[in-house]
Amino acid sequence: MTGPFDDLVGRLTEQFGVDPELKAEIAQELRGHLEDAASDFAAGGMNDEHAREAAVKALGDESEITKKLWDANRRRMRLHKAARWTLSLSAGPVAAVAVVAVGWSAFVSIVVLLGALQMVSTPGNSSYHFSAANLFEQVRQDRIAGLAPDAKFIFDRPGTAHDAIQWSKALTEKYPTDPVYQSNYIIQLLGSGNPKDKDGVPVQQVLDACDRGAQLEPQNAFYPFCASATILIRSGKPLETPVPPPAESSFTYTADWLDQKNNVVTFSPASWQVDDPAKLRAGLDLLHAAAECSVLDSHVIDMLERRLEQLPPATTLGQQVLEPTWEIATILPNLNPYRLAINVGCSAAMDDVAAGRRDDALQLVADMEHISLMAAQHSHAIVELLVAEGMYTEALGTSVIVYRQLKMPERADAAEKQFLEGERYRNSLRSAPNGASRQIALHGDVLTSELFTFMSGPNMPKLAPGRNAEYAVIDRLGLTMLAALLVVLGAGKAAHLLRRAPRRKAFLFIGWRRLAQATLIALLPVAIYAVYAAITPLSGRDYGLRISVDRLPVEYAAVAAAVILLIHALAQRAITARAAEIGVAPPPRSPSRVASNVIVAFAVIAYLIIWRVLAAQMNANWPFTNGWGLLFVPALLIYSLVGSTARAVYTGVIVALTLGSTLLIAAGVNTTAWGPFCLSIGLSVSAGMALLAIWQFVRGLNADKSSDFSFGLSAAPLFVTTALALLCIGGPLVRFQEKSAVAEMNAPGGSYNLVHEIEYSRWNGEQERLQKMLTSEF
Amino acid sequence: MDISPDMVKGSVVPVILSLVCERPMYGYEMVKLVDARTGGKLQWRQGTLYPALHKLESDGLITSDWRSAGGGRSRKYYSITRRGRGELSRRAAEWNVFSTSLNRLLSAGGKA
């Protein structure tokens, strides 16, 4: 913009070069004054030139005005210089800290979710330790930091087997008459190595500990049974090829729960190769001693409750998903020896029959049935009951063969009837329409759907709390990723400041009021998404994270794209208005993108509707959790960032993705295995996107010559304030959601209680069934 | 009779505050209004008005906003703040005391 007073105004304002906006503002004010004055002089009869000269003269002495303007604005100029100096020193470190903090938060969210998956699928796996163990150790340390020394001593089972043995032994020494700690010591000993490994478990220590336990509780079969298992396991090894039962004694059953094409199974007892008959005999004597007892109580739940009750309630999903690891370490170690002991016993019973030791065989199968039913009667954890059920099934099936071999058809038929009754019960649970198995698989949180699908029954546990907690964590992840993206975009735009150029474009501040308004408006897509996710059925949040894992990235990317586009539009509007106020040329406007925005929005909504419709028809293989949704992420983000030509291309890409997914699903193509392919494509395109963004940015530095002000630089604060507002408003909200959901998870009936409480009717029913047998038989 | 530059200089702040207390105004409008109301007796050096306005704004006595003036132009309007109103009252009271005292002195001198 040039005018008749530009030279004078330029000289008067030259001193404000360090603050281009102030310079432009004062220039505009003085120029307007001179134009008004000249206009009035001209209206009084002067010609234009004389009018302008009169206006300049009326303005006063140039040097005096220059000095007074400087004096009047000295404070702002000093502040501006100080701010600029501070920014130049601190921007780098602050940005680095912000990126690290946001990155760490995102990492924690990812690890918590992955941890939930890995904990149930690969406990002890090296990759689990690599990715999650260190972080979870920190969570564990934080949670136990406030415990009193005694409480910490009881709770804090060390991670390594050797240390766990020392810890459990120390507990028995501190509380020598407490059977709970004695049982725990035996369980930790049993868990200290592979029971099949002869050197893995310290045998004499187990036997000594079992002796002490038997002195404390003479009627508890747990101690002689553990001693028996320890010895029996060392009497030989399992046969790789089991010996099939004689054809005339064998029987078949239908096992729908096996989930295979041929569910008709011929029962075959476990086969064991005896290397040390003396040990076998000693072990079977102890087994018989166990069967003479009246109860079998491992006290694992007592021990678990003693450990967990030391802790304050979990408030985060990270804390919550740690609890199953503690539960597993407390509950599981004795169960594999239980199972192996019954296997050895079944094989020994068959050997007794073959060797003509009729009474020994009959006694042995009776002992094993009794022990199994006692284990079921006193099981307080589902997994204990499951193992007891398996032991009983194995013993009962062996009894059928033994009775038939010994020509006792009535007892054989009765045992077979009981066996088949158990199978029918399990099959009925499996084949129940809309049974809990399918419901848990579709609607459960990751841990529940991984851990409890195969243990499901006809009634549902509360699945929403665990699911909501996971959605809160992944929402936090999405929120922090969006905030990080906005900070990076803002920093990228502010990087213009680093450019050393003779005519570096200036920053135009849009004003605090406009900045606040624009920030609030920029949050609208996130607020709308929150409402959509919370109350609309389209959101699919009634499905678990494993099912919606393809859908969430699309939603998050769409919200991020909407926020970015909105910030651009709002910044453009505010900068244009501000530029008009102070009479400077605004940065050039971007061409309208309403049409492409509408097309993209329709494509995304169509994908989400297709997902929702098909989720209702989902089968067990979940054919569309294939990583397809990940392809939308780079496409949507690139779309929100690029110029008009590339935008048309990416509009086409997004539409093609929606059409492609529709066609694949309509054609019934199973794309379950496509995850890695889609992920690698998504990551490759994301890398391309980053390069494109850098190229566009570098190109944009020199592209706009029509204004002294940089659009990107002037829009940068809006990106940063939106990121901060997201974290300040959204962060506490998702944290509140997570905390509430975790509290519900721990309430009675919450899904996580399934790990150690039998209040799930399927298990109540099963325990009652087994107890009834125990009562009727013995 | 022209008013001395020192007296004009001393009056700038209270005059500005008094004007923007009536309604929001832009700089040239103030110059015109002062000229009209004083019949041209109070001749401001117009260029010094803006440093005064900026100083008052920096001190929080007035505030400004840009408004469209039509024809693609915009003008910076100044409005008085609450603090500015207090300062105007203080200055008006000070001026009353000063002028009354001065009048008395000058009257006494005239009679002598």
Image: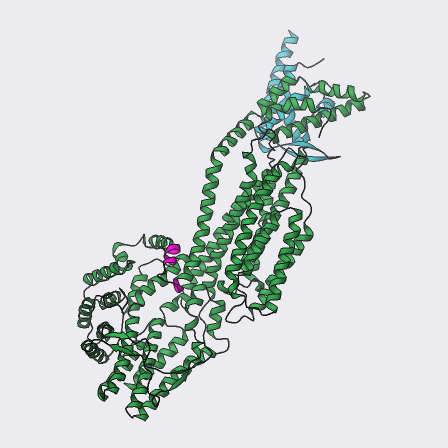
Shade of chain B as shown in the rendered figure: cyan
Q: Is residue A633 magenta?
A: no
Secondary structure, magenta segment, majority class: helix
- x and y percent of residue A577 in the render? 66, 39
- x and y percent of residue A765 in the render? 39, 79
Viewer-nearest residue: A234 or A8: A234
- x and y percent of residue A490 in the render? 55, 42
Q: Residue at x 77, y 25 (%)?
A: A39
Against A281, residue A526 (above or below) is above
Viewer-nearest residue: A626 or A9: A626
Q: Is residue A124 magenta?
A: yes
Q: Which residues are magenta?
A: A119-132
Against A173, residue A522 (above or below) is above
Residue A141 visible somewhere in the drawing: yes
Against A542, residue A594 (above or below) is above
Q: Is residue A245 left or right of residue A508?
A: left
Viewer-nearest residue: A101 or B86: A101
- x and y percent of residue A365 in the render? 27, 83
